[in-house]
Each structure stands twice: as C-alpha cells, then as structure tokens.
Amino acid sequence: MKVGRKIVQHTTYKTCNSCGKANHFASICKSKTTQPRQVKTKPKQKLNFRKHVHIIQDESASEDDYVFMSAISRKGIPVFEIEMSGRHTEILADSGASVNILPEQVYNALPTQPALEPCMNRIFPFSSSQPLEVVGKLQAKVQYKDTSRIASFVFHPMIGISVVLTYQAVGLLKAVNKLQKEDITDEFSDVFSGLGKLQDHKVKLHIDETIQPVAQKYRRIPFHIRKQLDKHLDKEEEMGVIEKATGPTPWVSPLVIVPKPKNPDEIRVCVDMRAPNTAIRREKRSTPTLNELSTILADAKYFSKLDLNQGYNQLELNEESRYITTFATHRG
C-alpha cells in the first residue's frame, strides 16, 4: 500500500534473512545476535560417470529353428531308444525339425554334465509364434543301434514334452525314392506348364445383398509402371485368371501395385478388397488339431510336399460371384 510517497511492503508471512524469524525484514531486525539464514538445499547427487555398454542382440542375424513338440500320449507314435553319453533315452524323430531338442531333465540325468553353451537361435514349436525357452546347448555323442555320431543338442526347461531329434541325427529315417526335379517335370510336363486350375469345381461366394455396393474411386497408376501392369494384365487374361467386365459394375475396387523387393523390375499386383469383404459371408470350416494330425499320421510311411503356383488363382469363381471382384485400371 502507499503512505504519502513512501511504499510500505507487507511483511506478513515474510522471513528475515538475518535471524530467520517470520513477519519482518532484515533491515529492521532487532535481534542482537545475527544468525545466518538456513536455506534448505537438496543433497547433491553423485554423478556416475561409469560408462554402460548395452549389448543389442540382433535376432535376425541368426536363423530361426522349428521343432515339433508333443505333450500327448505316445500311444500310436513311433519312438526310438538312443544312447546319449552312456544314458538310454526314448526319443521321437521329427523329419521336419531343424534342431535337436531335449528336456532339461535329460541333461540333469547325464553321468557327466558338461557346461552348457548359450543358444542364440530362436526355437519355435509347431504352430506357435512364441519362441521356446531354452537353457543352453552342447555337443554330445549319440548312438542308435550300430550308428553313432556327435550331434548338437538344445535343452529346454519344460517337463512332460516328448524328446525330439531330427532324423539326420543318427539316421533314424531314410529318404525313399528321392527324385530329382527334372524327373517329375519331364514325365508330367502337361501339369508343369502354364497355370493349373481345379477341375470340376467352381467356388461360390455367399454375398450379402443387404450391403450397399461400393464403387470406389480409381487410383491413379504412375506412368513408369503402366507398361509392366499392361504386361501383367495381358498375361493374367491369357491364362484365364481375369476377364474384362461388361455392363453395370456396382462393385469396383482399386488396384494396389508395389515393386517386388528382390526384383524391382517386377511388380506385385493386388486388389484392395476390403470393401467387398464386408459383404461376403464366410463359410465355417473346422481345422484339425495337432492331436488329431498326430494320430492320423502315426502309421504313415511316405510323406510328400506340394507347393501350388498361385494357388488362389487356380480356383475358378462361378459366374454369379465374379461381379464383386471387379477392379479398375487405367485401361478401364
């Protein structure tokens, strides 16, 4: 507040810098002994200049391994008895595994327990996206009948899982009638040329007619890839994968074109079917479980693998279902 020309400041809740008491200033302090003001300060934190080195493990640098893990009953499943470092163990041979894996209890039961080495590879059980926990790996001698060799084994802490070895470990399984690629392609040249098609069956899409059709806007295609797209469309039309649409087209979807990572000169052509998918009713199919597959394949002796070239394009749609797959290009 103002008193004449002199400004008087309020001293309420003020602390004296001389005696440290409240409600007055140091200039009018009447204390005989002057006490230094105690200022509360935070304790200084010691600075740690020690350098920390963070190790980053590049998981992509090491290849992933895959193994078939089975916790079901061994009834009906062929098992073998092997000798590992003087100890007999029953194992399950996995022709598709890329690593030999044993439970930790097998390692603990070995007469001599050499030190385990760290395992840098990730191991995925069948039909799982979570890697298996491992405790380490080692090199050990394994023998089956009259065959013995040194093999690498990985140990995991789980209990109750069947012991799994790759068939290469001691030659448990043998390839029968192994054929060369040329032997098959030359003998059946009619099915290895062009694009195949499922015979005597056409796929029917169950379309919900209550869904409003959407004719999406045409997405402009860059000029520098149009020649590649023209070549791709001509090839697909020649093989019977696509056909020109005529008449009204209530459903129209745009193209998505990207260069192939390993070959930038080639393109990958896809149709953005997100809108039509909302009107397509799914058919419910039951997928066999791992237990069912193990039982079905228990007595199997011969295995083959077939990779279809553009498998989805080998399924022909019936005429009533084709209109919902219409897509737009720079040619119409």
Image (cartoon, grey):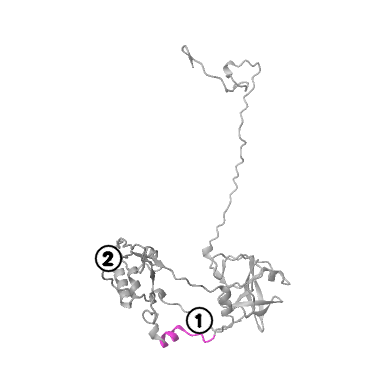
Q: Nearer the viewer, residue 73 or 139?
A: 73
* Residue at the far top in the pictured view: 4
x, y percentage for residue 108?
A: 71, 69
Which residue sits at x=54%, y=86%?
Answer: 176
Asked whether residue 186 is drawn in magenta, I would say yes
Residue designated by label 1: 304
Q: Quadrant of residue 297?
A: bottom right
Q: Residue 74 lies in what quarter of the image?
A: bottom right
Is 234 in front, or is 249? 249
Mark 1: few, some, or many residues within 10 Å (few <14, many ≥20)? few
Return the x and y of residue 309 as percentages of the image width and height. Answer: 41, 76
What amino acid type is highlighted by mark number 1? Ser
Residue highlighted by disc 2:
330
Q: Secondary structure at mark 2?
A: loop
Magenta segment range?
176-187
User: Most extreme residue toward the right, as rendered?
Assistant: 111
The vertical placement of 36 against 261, above or below, is above
Q: Amino acid at mark 2?
A: His
